[in-house]
Image (cartoon, rainbow, N blue to C red):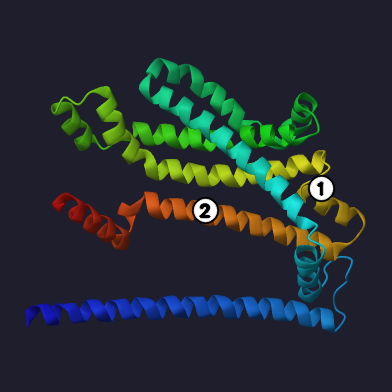
Amino acid sequence: MTSITSSEPAAVGRDDLADTGWRRVGMHILIFIIIVGSWELAGVFGQLNDLLLPPPSKILGEFAYMWFVTGRIYWHFFVTMFEATAGFFIGVSIGISLATMAAISPAFRRYIAPYAVVFNVTPGIAVAPLVIAWFGFGWSSKIALATITCFFAPFINTLTGFLATDVEADELFRSMRANRVQYFWKLQFPSALTLIIAGLKLALTGALLAAIVAEFFSASEGVGILMQRFAFKLDIDAALATLLSMSLMGLLFFTVMELLDYYVLYWKRDSRMQVISKKRKAAWRM
């Protein structure tokens, strides 16, 4: 009788949360419809200059045309995505490797930290002409600029996570005479995962931004140069459609990082924690 009574408030609480979630989604959709509808009506009644801001219907029409009719966006989309992804993986590999060595060796940390700060405070856009001069006009210069731009966030977040271990957990591991490898993999690394993934999210956004900026400077392919060509021809419909494609790429990257956060940091969510606990309990019984 007690269990039935205690389960009723929990069920009611879940229903309230579901209602609140649907209400928020409905409000977001309503706000979006109002904004886009007002924008479209302004174009219908001649209140917009198509050379400056065309109505949403024209932008979406151009978006559909370049994606589903001509297909000209696909190669440019792939080029920018490859440049950003390659720069991201290289920058993250360097940043996390240096952060790991800095966490292990205080002497190395004292000498490497100032150079990392210099990399961070140097504007990536200012370095772009030099990077293009060093690496040429092809993909390599875009990858290099993406690497430089996204290096610092994984470095500083990983280093901060490794050094910010729980004091009581640290004392427990030392009292159990854990060696350096056990201390790193069982305590430091799991404790730092939240900050590491946060750094990866920042790095991926920076890599995409750097790749597109480098394409603005000098490129023959990529969504950055494609948008620039449309803008120079005053084809604002196509330019904004290309910008919408960039947003789609950013949303794709964001979704990948959110999935990584969801599956790796499972202890942050009760539902995932329960699933993992059941799986491990079943494995132990076998």
Left/right placement of residue 153 relative to residue 224 reads: left
User: Dividing the picture into quarters, in which one does residue 106 lie?
Assistant: top left
Label 2 secondary element: helix
- At horizontal 47% and vertical 55% (from top left) the residue drawn is 258
Q: Which residue is mark 1?
A: 225
- Which three-letter amino acid code belongs to the residue tagged 2? Val
- At horizontal 77% and vertical 47% (from top left) the residue drawn is 222
Separation of marks 2 and 1 at Cα, in angstroms: 25 Å
Query: Could you tell me residue 236's position as x and y percent?
Result: 85, 63
User: Dividing the picture into quarters, in which one does residue 133 lie?
Assistant: top right
Decide: is 119 above or below 56.
above
Q: Which residue is mark 2?
A: 256
- Which three-letter amino acid code belongs to the residue tagged 1? Ile
User: Residue 258, which numbered label?
Assistant: none
Q: Earlier in the sequence, mark 2 or mark 1?
A: 1
Left/right placement of residue 256 relative to residue 43 reads: left
Label 1 secondary element: helix
- At horizontal 14% and vertical 28% (from top left) the residue drawn is 176
- At horizontal 26% and vertical 29% (from top left) the residue drawn is 183
